[in-house]
């Protein structure tokens, strides 16, 4: 089984959050997950839901703030093995090009 999730963890405070977000992302390294951070969150891949939840819990608690907001969206495909990259590749196949506005010169 493959579980793909979008995670966003941030302190509720004024000012910059990059250091706090970095703490949350670094906490993922303690788990058997693959991840990629983008401007809106971090995409995480895990073999099972238990591994995902453990990683997310540690990412959440890694943010040292009086108030922390965590958003988690999970795609738990239980009958098909797939990766986050395969999901993007499928969209790109239908688009006939990379799924980005930054396209190579033609």
Image (cartoon, rainbow, N blue to C red):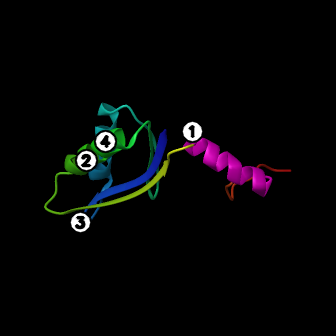
Estimate the x, y position of residue 10 in percent, counting from the top left.
Answer: 29, 58
Crowding around mark 1 (Cα neighbors within 10 Å: few <14, some 14 to 19, many 20+) is few
> Mostly what secondary structure, the magenta segment?
helix
Q: Nearer the viewer, mark 3 or mark 4?
A: 4
Q: Which residue is mark 1?
A: 81
Residue, disc 4: 55
On screen, residue 5 versus residue 101, left or right, reads: left
Residue identified by numbered label 2: 57
CA gap, disc 1 to disc 3? 36 Å
Highlighted magenta segment, given as a residue range: 80-97
Q: How dense is the environment of label 4, judged by Cα within 10 Å: few (below 14), some, or many (20 and up)?
A: many
The mark closer to the camera, 1 or 2, is 1
Q: Residue at x 39, y 53 (%)?
A: 7
Secondary structure, mark 2, is helix
Identify the element where label 3 is drawn.
loop
Mark 3: few/some/many CA within 10 Å (<14, 14-19, 20+):
few
The residue that disc 3 covers is: 12
Q: Are marks 2 and 3 in contact (CB under 8 Å)?
A: no
Could you tell me which residue is drawn at 68 percent across and 46 percent down?
A: 89
* Residues at circles 4 and 2 in contact by the CB criterion of under 8 Å: yes
Q: Write the residue at 32% across / 41% down.
A: 50
Question: Residues at badges 4 and 1 in contact (C-beta under 8 Å)?
Answer: no
């Amino acid at each position: 089984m493959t579980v793909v999730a979008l995670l966003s963890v941030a302190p509720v405070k004024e000012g910059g959050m990059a250091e706090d977000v970095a703490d949350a992302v670094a906490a993922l390294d303690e788990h058997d997950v693959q991840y990629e951070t983008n401007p809106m969150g971090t995409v995480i891949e895990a073999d099972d839901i238990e591994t995902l939840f453990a990683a997310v819990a540690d990412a959440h608690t890694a943010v040292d703030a009086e108030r922390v907001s965590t958003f988690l969206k999970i795609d738990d495909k239980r009958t098909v093995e797939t990766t986050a990259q395969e999901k993007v590749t499928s969209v790109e196949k239908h688009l006939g090009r990379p799924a980005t506005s930054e396209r190579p010169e033609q």
